[in-house]
Image (cartoon, rainbow, N blue to C red):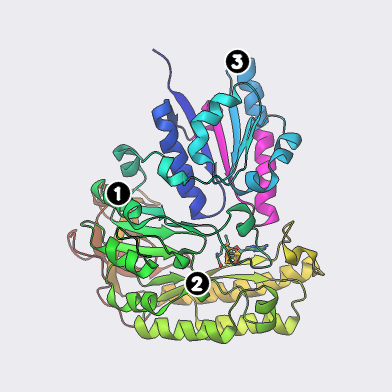
Amino acid sequence: MTRPRKLFVKSYGCQMNVYDSHRMADTLAPEGFVETAAPDDADLIILNTCHIREKAADKVYSELGRMRVLKETAAREGRRVTVAVAGCVAQAEGEEIVRRERSVDLVFGPQSYHRLPEMLKRAEYGKVIDTEFPVEDKFDHLAAPSRIAMRKRGPAAFITVQEGCDKFCTFCVVPYTRGAEVSRPVEKIVAEAERLADAGVREIALIGQNVNAYHGRDESGRTSSLARLLYRLAEIPGIARLRYTTSHPRDMDDELIAAHRDLPALMPQLHLPVQSGCDRVLKAMNRGHTRADYLRIIERLRAARPDLALSSDFIVGFPGETEEEFRDTLRLVSDVGYAGAFSFKYSPRPGTPAAEMAQLPENVKDERLQCLQAEIGRQQAAFNARCTGRTFDVLFEKPGRKPGQIVGRSPYLQPVQVMAPAGMVGEIAAVTVTEAGSNSLFGALVRAPKSANARVVEAAGV
Ligand code: SAM
Ligand code: SF4
């Protein structure tokens, strides 16, 4: 009997890469590949890379050095290991990767994943580089996950509904690595959600680089908004919770804001990146919105859903940002009050307009980042602390940190550790929060598992 071929996939960066990695594994399963968590055991190693900041791209090259050693060890044992680089570094750097790291056999961009089986065959005879933006939709050709794979991945799943970006923020590589905005048709997304629900998935997060710019065709040929797609998915039996990420303030339309009020399955949590609190910087970033526009959207969202937990992305040290302009960002953070946020030092990306502008010294960026992260950390801790004593539904996802514990997510996306039977993974149950840490909550079950729609049992006060 031939031994199944082993596949090791490592994802860097965003959730879209995690989703893509799953779909690559699904596409390779019919070719006889089974996933392994150990790279030294693998016949095929895929690094699914991220190019968003310099550090993310650098990590790939140091990992490739380790993969070269594995490949050489395997060769001495008479085993062939194929090393592939996928994702945005592959798209942006193409052949340069093979020049820098000879052990790489295959380089392919995010739009080529469906051609993986064919590319692997070609890689047996020489290096393969595929960074085309093909005309056909890769989603039409990627294999669906098996029921076993879906169950293994847990009760909360992602579906990519939109890819690419037409907004061209001056700091960002995404429009160059992921290409123009494309939305998947409604029926394909619904079919994928139905399959997931059938395998026990209870929560779906719709993902896209600009997810609220979604404009896929529905069955009657009309364009559907993200809000309408969410309403459609909420009708699927078993799907109790919906989320979406990442949104752009410019695409936060009335219908979507109203869905936060009217659609019970839509969780009271939203990641809405703003990047800066200063209008001059926002303009230089080509964000297409002002600080006031952003604050107005937040006000309307909170009017629709008062307990909405907000998070955001911030960039500090954008070229030309003055101390006072950075203070504007700090003031915005304190005006909004976030449940959490990601913050980054500006990282010049080759080929983007901001990389050509006069850069700030690294120590200035470091100080600003520390200062902003301290404020965000305080807000996150305060948000978590306000949850103590509250009771809300938790979707249990996997075993917890300690024996006897399982961990799930609150409606606000915080991890919640609870002493409960492992058999409750996949269930939604009411939990009273007994203690709040800086990153997660601890709680106790208040009643037996139930399967009704997720809801906040006691919503006031967050
Ligand atoms: N489309 C989303 C939006 O418009 O906010 C964000 C997508 S991007 C993958 C995720 C985050 O990475 C951005 O929100 C931004 O904060 C950060 N980012 C992007 N380019 C960056 C750069 N050159 N330096 C530092 N952070 C960057
Ligand atoms: Fe990048 Fe801006 Fe597009 Fe977001 S909207 S992906 S930050 S270019």
Q: Secondary structure at mark 3?
A: loop
Does residue 299 lie above or below 4 as drawn?
below
The percent position of residue 447, horizontal first and vertical second, equals 18, 64
Please tell me which of labels 1 and 2 falls first in the chain: 1
Please tell me which of labels 3 and 2 falls first in the chain: 3
Q: Are marks 1 and 3 in contact (CB under 8 Å)?
A: no
At horizontal 34% and vertical 51% (from top left) the residue drawn is 188
Measure how far apart labels 3 and 2 are at the Cα level: 51 Å
Q: Can you tell me whether the CB of the residue at mark 2 lies under 8 Å from the nearest atom of ligand 1?
A: no
> Which numbered tag is attached to residue 389?
none
Q: Secondary structure at mark 2?
A: loop
Give the residues drawn in magenta, as a range.
37-66
Which residue position is annotated with label 2? Answer: 272
Which residue position is annotated with label 3? Answer: 77
Circle 2: residue type: Leu
Circle 1 packing at 10 Å, graded few (<14), some (14-19), many (20+), is many
The percent position of residue 370, horizontal first and vertical second, equals 66, 70
Position of residue 180 in the picture relative to residue 402 (left or right): right
- Of residues 59 and 171, the one drawn nearer to the viewer in this rendering: 171
Q: Quadrant of the C terminus?
A: bottom left
Q: Secondary structure at mark 1?
A: helix
